[in-house]
Amino acid sequence: MEFQIDKRDGKARACTINTAHSVIKTPVFMPVGTVGAVKALDATDLATFIQPEIILGNTYHLHIRPGEKTIKTMGGLHGFTRYTKSFLTDSGGFQAFSLSDKVKIDENGITFRSHLNGDKLYFTPKKVVDIQTDLNSDIMMILDDLVALPATQERISESIDRTSRWAKESIEYFREQQHRGIGVNQSIFAIIQGGTDKGFREKSARELCAMPFDGFAIGGLSVGEANQDMYDTVEWTTQFMPEEKPRYLMGVGTPEDLVENVSRGIDMFDCVMPTRNARNGTLFTSFGKVNIKKAIYTTDESPIDVECECMVCKTYSRAYLRHLYRAREITYFRLGTIHNLFYYLNLMKQMREAILEERFEAFKVEFYKKRKQ
């Protein structure tokens, strides 16, 4: 992976990441394709209407079904899914948080019970690297110990110490494999933990950023804390992260979250919000959210967003989309998802242009002004 900073505007950064499969311009939002597909879309939809340079897959879910060996046999994630651009794969650490009733964490790894059939699974730092090597993702994440907030100081301290130990084991094993010619076109990111405690975040960041990872993520946010606490934690943590490597904020978030965290120096984001909200009838626009279920749209001939250039806004009315949603027509899920992802990726492009032209603060003012109309 190659990384360069193209421009800074305050703390906001416009960067370029080159992987074996694509050239990624940041700030970037990565659509979530948990099981190797962005829900309601296929690779042709992505290539034609969304055009992301990178999407996210999930190690835990792909390991359970269809299994990394099957995917490797089929040419890795790119050959299997026919999505030819870059993949980032999460490690499974988030599932230890989201499936907490089926999980046990010890010093060496995480024991899961499969949410499908209850089978026992054991993830260690090395096993997670091996799974993601077989998946052939462009960027893999280390196994980390994610804590729900609020949490005790003791539990957060335990989390960052364990994450650092696992990180050291992961990077040493990953580099050993590369020296043997395995995974040579892949990159690996560490995940900074520490809740919203400044001391813990600094400790975690300093320990991890001293290791030779290709990039660094901030994890453990958007898990129950107030938005301002998230922003303050990001602003505090980025100062301890290397300038010359990508910065990734995991699992975030709303359009406002993206703008606020780009202004604090974050390059990469992912979140299920645009796809999940589309399926639930909430569509994002330049002027805020549209709840397409509302009766006021019954005969509304306007597009979802008059400023949007996506295929959906150029073709269909709010009235038609409302009808499709209420009829539970599968077509709605595809169209709503295309629009929301287009909106998110276009927002990132607008922020990049603003940074390159050194007018990010003016962009931010205009972004919020529109949402108050």
Image (tube, helix red, strand yellow):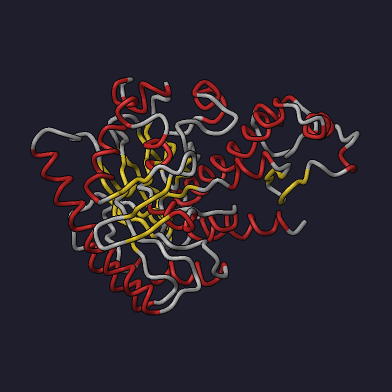
Residue at image coords 51%, 56%: 360
Residue 174 rendering spot, x and y as whole percentages:
18, 45
For residue 238, above or below residue 331:
below
Residue 244 rendering spot, x and y as whole percentages:
26, 54
The image quadrant that residue 17 belongs to is top left
Whether residue 7 is visible, yes or no, is: yes
The image quadrant that residue 321 belongs to is top right
Determine whether, in the image, residue 228 is placed left or right of residue 180. Answer: right
Q: Which of 141 and 127 is in front in this view?
A: 127
Q: Quadrant of the N terminus?
A: top left
Residue 300 rendering spot, x and y as whole percentages:
87, 35
Q: Quadrant of the C terminus?
A: bottom right
Q: Which of 332 and 303 is in front in this view?
A: 332
Residue at image coords 45%, 31%: 36
Determine whether, in the image, residue 306 is placed left or right of residue 139. Answer: right
The image quadrant that residue 285 belongs to is top right
Residue 80 rendering spot, x and y as whole percentages:
39, 22
Whether residue 1 is visible, yes or no, is: no
Determine whether, in the image, residue 94 is placed left or right of residue 229. Answer: left
Residue at image coords 21%, 51%: 170
For residue 12, above or below residue 312:
below
- Extreme-left residue of the structure: 180
Residue at image coords 36%, 78%: 154
For residue 192, above or below residue 139:
below
Figure disc tally: 0
Q: Which of 155 and 294 is in front in this view?
A: 155
